[in-house]
Image: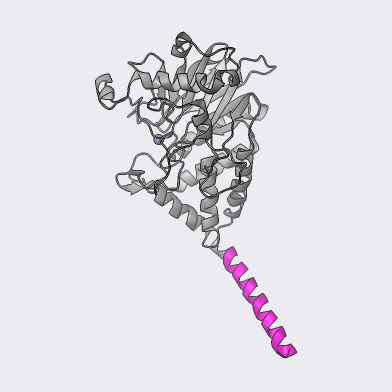
Amino acid sequence: MDFLGETMGIVRILTNAIRLQAVARVAQPKQTFAPLELTKRLNIYLRSQFAGNGFVRFPISTDSCVTFDSTPEKIAGGVIYFDQTKSRDKPIKLVLIGDIHAALQNFNAIINKYRAGLEDGSVQLVFLGDLIHPERGSDLENMTTSIQIMRQMMVLMEQYPGQIHWVRGDHENLFDGNLHKGFIFQCDEMRKALASEAGPEFAEQYLQEVQAFFENLPYFAVIHGSQGLTFAGHSPVSKGGRNFSDLVAAREDRSGPNHRSPYLYNRPTCFWHTREERLAMGYDDIDVRMTLKRLFNCDGAYQMFGFPRALSETDLAKITVVSGHNRLDDLSRFQLEGFTNTIFCLQSFFSNPEIIEIEQGAISFTNLY
Ligand SMILES: [Mn+2]
């Protein structure tokens, strides 16, 4: 090849490269690249987040929990333990928030309500899953507010490290083909919306990173103070209970196409069933007790939670359970009857939802507005 030909070849390659770059730039909206990088940073953070200001995240799975990521240091699922037993200069107020389901106005109001506490380090927020996907209305396929909430959560998690906790719900998933409302498949809609936001060059990478983010989230929270012990999660009670190690590792059968986690989708505490109906479905008070008993007493877990011995039946009966996940038509809070333990279900997409505040282990309710 002569010199001119070679030069023209190089010029052509360079021109193509510049044109490709230009296409990539044009194809993606300006905010897209930041969330991809932010999601990557948070995934690294979530996999290394073991202890913070008054909490420990029990930890570690070396199993392949993250669908698209085979690095060995991952932690997925797991339990965050908030220790309010120790006296501090500044006690931490923990706030439990039920399903937001894309209600952006409520989400913003929650952040504004606790902004000062986030700033001075006196407040930590625990969102109990299902922040995304509209729950009702004619707009079930519209993912705009879901994406805004997701981005805002990620920004806040980085801005206030260890103060914003996102517990995973069954909607925090891009690949659950069973998840639909009125046959609108919301995981598919979310994938489409994210892919179009990222642009063709980055769609696959972005989707993988977001799914890894969801799978890196904790599944449960234990809050322990001098005035009480609370076990919280999106769907915290499993049939027959789970060992501490199971919960920590979140090892689960997600074989098959749908990635539906049995840890995130259970209804043993479903409010609209009578005790008789629950029994007929195979769910009983015993599932709540077994969940707590196995969580705290198996594998010597009580030691990790700072108890000198395994919890007695009397101790276990006093534990409060807080759950999201159950639809409470026109109610933001529901106390389930017919159980030995006190069980509250929370939702946060109604006009003026109630949220739970916990200080020194003691629970109180407050209205958002
Ligand atoms: Mn749910």
Q: Is residue 309 above or below residue 140?
A: above
Above-or-below relation of 58 to 338:
below
From the top left corner, tell me how far across and down residue 241 is, in percent.
Answer: 42, 25
Q: Is residue 24 magenta?
A: yes
Is 67 placed above or below 21 here? above
Residue at 63% across, 40% down: 45
- Ligand 1 resides in the quarter of the picture at top left
Write down the region rendered in magenta: 1-25
User: Is residue 335 visible from the viewing direction of this image?
Assistant: no
Q: In the orientation shown, which residue stands out farthest toward the bottom?
A: 2
Question: Where is residue 76 shown, x and y percent of the image?
Answer: 54, 38
Residue 62 x, y percent position in the rendering: 58, 39
Q: Is residue 263 visible?
A: yes
Is 19 one of the magenta-colored residues? yes
- Does residue 263 appear to the left or right of 44 in the view shown? left
Q: Give percent across and percent down for residue 180.
A: 34, 44
Of all residues, the one furthest to the top in this rendering is 314
Q: Please tell me which residue lies in front, 257 or 24.
A: 257
Closer to the camera, 25 or 7? 7
Magenta region, mostly helix, strand or loop? helix
Question: What residue sits 41% from the left and 16% below the top?
Answer: 342
Closer to the camera in the image, 190 or 156: 190
Q: Nearer the viewer, residue 170 or 284?
A: 284
Horizontal arrangement in the rendering, residue 320 relative to residue 275 (left or right): right
Most distant residue in the front direction: 299
Q: Compared to 143, does 322 lie above or below?
A: above
Q: Quadrant of the N terminus?
A: bottom right
Please tell me how many numbered marks the rendered image carries.
Answer: 0
Extreme residue in the right direction: 3
Quadrant in the picture for residue 279: top left
Name the residue located 39 percent from the left edge and 26 percent from the top edge.
332
34 relative position to 282: left or right: right
